[in-house]
Image (spheres, rainbow, N blue to C red):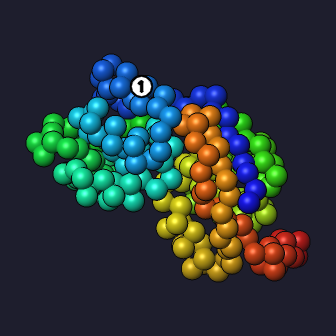
Amino acid sequence: MQRIDYQIALNHITEASETPHQAKQWFIMQQQHAGEIARVRLALHSLPYVTSYELPFRLLLIRAPQAIEKLRDELTIHSRRVEINGSKRGVLYSLDADVVAPEAFHYTRKFTVFRSGAEGGTENSYTSIARQVSVPRERLRLALTSRLLVTALDALLFFGVQRLASDIAALRKNGLKIDLLHVEAFDSQTQQLREIPAYRLIVDNAIAAAVSLAA
């Protein structure tokens, strides 16, 4: 199984209404070298609430909804819909049923990530695509049709994709033949080596796309 390494030089997320205490707690959370479930558990106990945006981007979770569902076996987690960066599909999670929280959240994100691995090349291939288009799913489509291997962390870190499986399903429905494989990935923020899903265009489909573009 091939391995891909991500050196996280900067992963800074801010929210318009967050307090200095919340910002400090998130900074502490990001220093925790633990598995996904442990990081979500600690965040829920340390903060009044967390959102479906914060779990993947602040904690680098690639299966945040599944982590929440597993923790429901041991914790009473309350959730409700909120607006995140203009989308009404966001979710707020809290251990407090009566938590006071905004109904809308506005996040900004700054990051610097270095990628190395046998397939897919360096971060330059991915940041170049991110500069060309702004919609996360379109970034994913362009990367795949450019014959890049896209891991769950590539999609999250470089393209801002939060619902990778859903976006892959939509691209398949639109005619792309996409292969699923797994790779080992290490990131310097969590210090975790984990097996994660990765996707690439099936070769025959990629050739057809290239011929179509050439025509």
Q: Which residue occupies the extreme top position in the image? A: 20
- Which residue is located at x 35 percent, y 30 percent? 16
> Which quadrant does the N terminus fall into?
bottom right
Q: Quadrant of residue 200?
A: bottom right
Left or right, 84 with reference to 101: right
Residue 174 image offset from top left, x and y in percent: 60, 78
- Which residue is located at x 67 percent, y 67 percent? 181
Residue 12 visible, this orientation: yes
- Which residue is located at x 57 percent, y 80 percent? 173
Residue 175 image offset from top left, x and y in percent: 64, 80
Q: Amino acid at mark 1?
A: Ile
Residue 114 image offset from top left, x and y in percent: 71, 36
- Which residue is located at x 81 percent, y 75 percent? 203
Left or right, 127 with reference to 55: right
Helix, strand or loop at disc 1? Answer: helix
Circle 1 residue: 28
Left or right, 34 with reference to 69: right
Residue 28 image offset from top left, x and y in percent: 42, 25
Vertical comparison of 37 with 150: above or below: above
Vertical comparison of 138 with 207: above or below: above
> Which quadrant does the C terminus fall into?
bottom right
Residue 65 or residue 214, whichever sits in front:
65
Q: Which residue occupies the extreme left position in the image? A: 98
Query: Dot 1, crowdedness within 10 Å: few (<14), some or many (≥20)?
Result: few
Left or right, 37 with reference to 158: left
Residue 139 or residue 71, whichever sits in front:
71
How many marks can you see?
A: 1
Residue 133 visible, this orientation: no
